[in-house]
Amino acid sequence: MDSIIIKKFALSELFSSERGNSKLTKAYCNKHKGKYEVYTGSTKTSFAFIDTFAYSKPLLTYTTDGEYAGSLKVLEGKYSVGGHRAILKPIINGLPLLYFKFALQSLFFENVKRGDVPSLIWSNISRKEITLPVNNVGEIDIKKLENIAKEYQKLSDMKQKLYNQYEKINSVDIDIFKSSSTKRKVFLVEDILNTKGGNNKLTLKYINQNQGEYPVYSAKTKGNVVKGYCNTFDFDMECIRITRNGKAGVPFYQKKHKFSISEDARIYYPKEKYAKCLNLEYLVYALKEGLKYKGFSWNNKAGKAKINKIPILLPVTHNGEIDLEAQKQLLSSLKNIEQVKSMILANLKKLYTKDIEIQKL
């Protein structure tokens, strides 16, 4: 195997940096809507599309500030670059941009200045060095870089396929009834459940002035859903909590314990007639099925009147009575499916979030 000749280059020997156009604000873009994309600090979604473009050839760029500061991306087509992104313009002809996207990513992330607003300044990294293969006269071996970049692009494409598979599996609805011969019947929420609203006095200020051991649940659906801990409680029961605001209309199972809820949620619990024939954990799954097409949000709040009319599909006996044992069996199957689904998703996420960077020469 031929030995590789390598040489160190400062980034300033390879690229010059040019900041994007700061006038391309959201307000400006809204006044000049069109078909040409504006790339700025956002890495997850499109920022805007306008009626003109500044560039029409591929360029390597990076975000200069914000949560994703230092993220490298090769832009193609006809486009413009906003003030929260900078362009790396090659000084040497023929540099394969894709190679440097992979090779420089970890270096850029390592040099982001942390703080309230993370940032990356070209002057702080322009003197950093990267090792590259060269030919006998010390010129960068462009062909070798292109071949390496192609292999890493294959890995990147594979990551994207894994991510797509993750999203597909994550969006799959579990309809246990499709493979079940269980007889079922539709009930409305108001037919079988009572409800109580949250406490509007439970502001953060009030909770901080009355700290204690009892949790106060908010309308959050992810992360820490506890707003704080108070020295009093409003409820001590098993129930279902449904959010009214934010990501509204999301049901949660609550084990029996002492707690309160903010005004951004309501609790639901069995009417006395049905207290002994409803499994609330199963009911959460059934409610999710009835809620998913309602499009609840900040602008379409999941109020009492709307939730009361949500249909719930329950298994029933041959006499038409709600079947508690069938609910338990269905719940067990649903939990097993969710467990397998979670394991598959966790493994896929490990793979598609794994960083791809070119090994140092």
Image (spheres, helix red, strand yellow):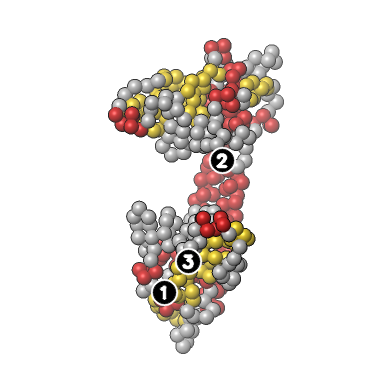
Q: Where is residue 169 in the image (x, y as percent from the top left)?
A: 60, 44
Q: Is residue 357 visible?
A: no
Mark with earlier residue (2, 3) = 3
Residue neighbourhood size for the residue with mark 2, other residues' Cα within 10 Å, grouped as few (<14), some (14–19), many (≥20): some
- Quadrant hosting residue 285: top right
- State the residue at coordinates (54%, 49%): 348
Front one among 85 and 288 = 85
Q: Position of residue 188 (x, y in %)?
A: 62, 21
Give the residue number, with chain letter if any, for mark 2: 341
Element assignment for label 2: helix
- Quadrant hosting residue 292: top right
Q: Position of residue 198 (x, y in %)?
A: 45, 25
Front one among 223 and 116 = 116
Give the residue number, with chain letter if any, for mark 3: 20
Drawn side of residue 220 relative to residue 289, left or right: left
Residues under labels 1 and 3: Cα distance?
A: 19 Å
Residues under labels 2 and 3: Cα distance?
A: 43 Å
Mark 1 or mark 3, whichever is nearer to me: 3
Q: How many marks?
A: 3
Mark with earlier residue (1, 3) = 1
Front one among 235 and 181 = 235
- State the residue at coordinates (42%, 20%): 235
Give the residue number, with chain letter if any, for mark 1: 11
Residue neighbourhood size for the residue with mark 3, other residues' Cα within 10 Å, grouped as few (<14), some (14–19), many (≥20): many
